[in-house]
Image: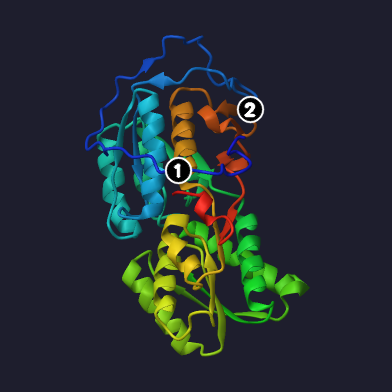
Amino acid sequence: MSRKRILSITAPLLAGVLLAATACGGTTQGDDDDGGGAATGGTADPDADYQTGLSIAMLPKSVNNPYFDASSAGAEAVVTELEGTYEYTGPSDASASSQVSYIDTLSQQASDAILLSANDPNALCASLDQARAGGTIVVTFDSDVEASCRDLFVSQVNGDEVALSLLEMAAEQTGGAGEIAVLSATANATNQNAWIEAMEAELESNPDYADLELVDVVYGDDEDEKSFSETQGLLQTHPDLKAIISPTTVGIAAAARYLSGSEYQGEVALTGLGTPNQMREYIADGTVTEFALWDPTALGELAAYTAAAAASGIITGAEGEVFTAGDLGEYTVEADGIVTLGPPTRFNADNIDDFDF
């Protein structure tokens, strides 16, 4: 069963030692190269060979984040399979200014490709343009920049699907009525902002949600302690709050930790996006009923394959191009250079123990 459409039943986190240095240039074509590259007219040969020896680096929003650790493990496994060199590097704080210096360093090292989860859609563009001018392929994943600033974007899911899933879970857990709030990552996070906008539009237009009221959006900056404090602040500011939606793995875990030790456990619903291993204890103790996510390891794998395909000339980022991402299967480049992993999966007491990531 391909994870292109349905998340596999188990996704063990791949272990590996993160490499500290990235090799520069020196790529060679695979032994079985048939000379196939990206064709004109929006098509490509999905069976064309990847280059070996590619240097690929992943730059997440912040390091020491279990979600991005899983993505890194997936990417590193792909790069290793392709006989390339891999680096996982980034700031400890989720800010755009912190990411700029890392982009500049990778650009100076002449990395073949950068896998970037952006903290801002615009602030990184100057550095990314410089990297691309030097021949580095820029593939964003998880959180995008302006399309003109990168080559391709690997989206975890369709944004509207995420928004609908989050609202559906919140409605189910509140009986479809009451005040709800959002605990997001950073104020400039492209993906979270798109999901929040889609949720707001759905709340306004869908009569099924007429009795739900979004009363606040706060930002934990993908920092555990700040997300914990923001959760406390939400509950103090809105004593009638019925549910918190946190579309970030750091935020939902911090919110769950606060709720589990408070008078609000079982009274205020919490849902959003989290990893099963983070949230298992909170499902077990009744703090959380259900949450969702895609497989972050597979997301890292797909990002690495996409970057390698672009660096190998298999795809250019044109709509309609097709490439094969190993065991994940075939993927088609969509408009604006987007490649989509697949729909989110919901986790609850009935299935959470089937997953390990």
The label number, if any, that marks residue 42 in the structure image = 2
Amino acid type, label 2: Gly
Q: Can see residue 187?
A: no
Q: Residues within 10 Å of mark 2 (few under 14, many from 20)?
A: some
Estimate the x, y position of residue 20 in percent, counting from the top left. Answer: 22, 38
Label 1 CA crowd tier, 10 Å (few <14, some 14–19, many 20+): many
- The numbered mark, 1 or 2, whose residue comes first in the sequence reads 2
Q: Quadrant of the N terminus?
A: top right
Work out whether 85 lies above or below 67: above
Q: Quadrant of residue 255?
A: bottom left
Q: Residue beneath label 1, please?
A: 297
Residue 200: x and y in percent read 63, 70
Give the CA separation, mark 1 to mark 2: 29 Å
Element marked by disc 2: loop
Residue at the image point whose x is 44% and y is 28% from the top:
308
**Could you tell me which residue is drawn at 45 percent across and 86 percent down?**
263
Name the residue at 44% across, 41% down. 300
The mark total stands at 2
Residue 67 at x, y = what percent? 41, 52
Secondary structure at badge 1 equals helix
Near-viewer residue (85 or 14): 14
